[in-house]
Amino acid sequence: MAKLSSRFAPNIYREFKDLHGAEPRELARFYEQNQTQIQNLDAHEYFDLQVSYLVALFELGHHDKLLSLIDEPIEASIIHNFQKHNGKDVFRKLLYIKADAQYHLMQYKEAQHTFLELMKMDKTNVFYKEGLAKTMRKIVPQFVKNGRALCILFFILSAVVIAFEVLAIKHFFSDYTFHVEMIRNLLFALGWITLIGSELIHYFRVQAKVNKFTK
């Protein structure tokens, strides 16, 4: 919870706001160097700088640090009814950068949940829709895992046939060369068909689910 303003805090607030347009790294460094004084700002000023800092972390790709801090301002936006930050809906902005950070940290289940919450607020938002779709594609269902395993099996069998063809067929059973080549090519083709087919099914299932949700 933010503390009441001290006689030093307003200067810190103005100094930070004067950095508007600066590089994200400079904004983040200033915030971290003056964090104690920033925490002494009143609730609104503290929230304003906190969100600016989180946006800087987001732009820098510091996803771990961002996730460790973002829940507090999300709660503050609800408790204090803070609605805007730089002219944008601050609650949605914070949820979006949280979802993006979860995605980059491979927390796909959590990211999917956060993107779904955003979609409930605005189903027409292209960024929310794309974020949800790409996250759901990363959550690999069992049939895709089975398809990948089967693909590897087909490739291994194809390699075995090739080895048998080189070591035995061409030297001792040349009459069967054509048939062995057909088996080898068939196994290799089945491997690719299984892999690509399962991935495509997963892709289109995800798109169908996202489209159904938006409707």
Image (cartoon, rainbow, N blue to C red):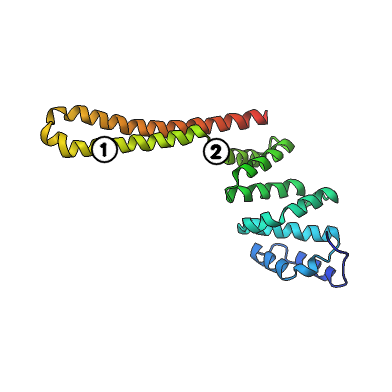
Contact between marks 2 and 1 (CB within 8 A): the answer is no
Which residue is drawn at the image coordinates 58% and 50% (left, top)?
104
Which of these two is toward me, 188 or 38? Answer: 188
Query: Which residue is disc 1 drawn over?
Result: 160
Residue placed most toward the observer, 141 or 189: 141
Please determine whether, in this image, residue 104 is positioned above or below residue 167: below
Q: Quadrant of residue 13?
A: bottom right
Work out whether residue 114 or residue 96 is closer to the camera in this orientation and state it.
114
* Mark 2 or mark 1, earlier in chain: 2
Q: Looking at the image, which is closer to me, 189 or 13?
A: 189
Q: Position of residue 100 (x, y in %)?
A: 63, 48
Q: Nearer the viewer, mark 2 or mark 1?
A: 1
Question: Residue shown at 62%/55% (left/top)?
Answer: 63
Which secondary structure lies at badge 1?
A: helix
Residue drawn at (56%, 39%) of the image: 139
Mark 2 surroundings within 10 Å by alpha-carbon count, few (fewer than 14), some (14 through 19), many (20 or more): some
Q: Amino acid at mark 2?
A: Arg
Q: Which mark, residue 137?
A: 2
Q: Is residue 37 above or below residue 168?
A: below
**Residue shown at 15% from the left, 36% from the top:** 168
Side (left or right) of 207 relative to 85? left
